[in-house]
Image: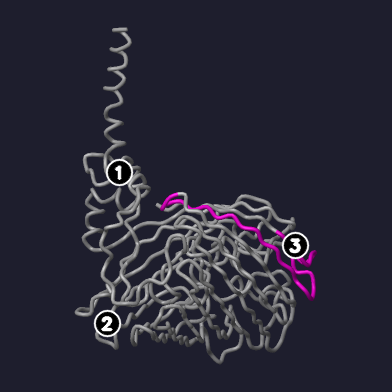
Amino acid sequence: MRTTRYVFAAALLALAPFTRAMAADSDDCSQGFASRFAAAYREDARPADPDAAAPARRAMPSPLPSPPFPSAEWQLGGVAYPIGVPNLNTRYPLEKALACNRFGKWMTDNRIEIYGWLNASANASTSSRSNYPLSYATRPNRVEFNQALLRIERLPDTVQTDHIDWGFHLDNLYGYDYHYTTMKGVFSNQLLNHPRAGQALNGKTYGYDPMLFYGEIYLPHVAEGMVVRVGRYLSLPDIEAQFSPNNYLVTHSVLYTVDPYTQMGVMTTTRLNAQWTLQVGINGGNDTAVWNHSSRPTLQACVRWVSKDNNDMLYPCVNSFNTSDYNYNNVQMYVTTWGHRFTDNVHILTEAYYMYGRNIPGFGPGGEPGVVASSPLPGKAGEYGIVNYLNIALNPLNMISIRNEWYNDQKGQRTGYATRYTTHTVGLTHWVSPDLEIRPEVRVEKSYDMPAYDRGRKDYQASLIVDAIWHY
């Protein structure tokens, strides 16, 4: 027995440093990076302090609970948050783990954040060659590495009104999803200069895209605040987004799959009052760098209105307008989004658009969205559609989203097939912890005027999909 006690005591002594590390907090600078990183996840898993003071804001109260919804605010592109809303991000594990070294302290002192996520998915489909125009899980019946994203940013403080502030944003994306985010002229050779015969999408299987890079300045004395953004930014409208954590569902609607993704230029967002926001900008065209030969001066203008009771949001946009003929993804786009909150836990979002290109020289069946191929298609080609989301928070950790869509690609320029589509999707988001979410969904869809699925072999498709997002 005495020998057993000695062995047990020795084991405790040997484990003592590990035990102390496990008990340490992320701000314990006596511990190494790995211990602080693990401690940050343990801290995130603890219940939030119900008595913690909410940050100051001069915007309307957040209309939606997040989590479980991906955002607490009504939609508004061109800014990280509507003007007057504070930075709602908590400190992510990577930031906490870095806080003890010189680099991390410098970032904290200067309000610079660094964080990101990893996202992978698996799908089972009735198609065997391609799931397109389902996105981003284009390749059927496989596990896919969708996104690894590292973000470095500084958000301007738009709550205060006494001084000019500034910010910047840099997103580095690697994974399969670069097929959809690539901008012509920005590392686009890996996609556009690597054709793959018979494939729904060209390019290398996995690629890198510096998806967003911009600087911005906040001018508090213009109206009730203006943010001027210069660089490459997300296209302003759309319920859906390129980044996995910002979406209600794993897959995207056809309406979103084939519309513009990013633009490069100057965008101004001006808060007129608590209910009205005006946006005006100029860019080099959809998904085209301003230095590329396909660039065309293109105007953008949007206005967002929110009702006094915060139950309704209307967001009409002229997302792209110029007088040029079609070149790389140069489409004219007019779009409106409407959101309505029934209760704190139930809301809908509806988006509709009309889009067209002039004097389109050609397209290829099953081709990549917005990329001209070989078949002649002179004149004007248009497409329009509508999508609706019904979103229900079951509790703080679970939400259900139901998406129904109708889309008409009149001449097949966007999807490769001149047909009408309907898609119906139901999905669940479950937050295992604040840093891990899992999203299963089921989707059924149909093309009505010609077979458009499995590379033109079927007029229907059904799929089961699940993904996981790990935040760091």
Q: CA distance from mark 2 to mark 3?
A: 51 Å
Quadrant the N terminus occupies: top left
- Say if residue 469 shows up in the picture: no
Most distant residue in the left direction: 162
Magenta residues, as a range?
433-462
Q: Residues within 10 Å of mark 1 (few under 14, many from 20)?
A: many
Residue 206 on image: x %, y %? 56, 56
Is 412 placed above or below 13 here?
A: below
Amino acid, disc 1? Arg
Instruction: Determine which residue is flagged by label 3.
Output: 454
Q: Residue at x 74, y 56 (%)?
A: 126
Q: CA distance from mark 2 to mark 1?
A: 38 Å
Most distant residue in the bottom direction: 323
Q: Residue at x 66, y 55 (%)?
A: 464
Callout 2 secondary element? strand
Instruction: Determine which residue is flagged by label 2.
Output: 219
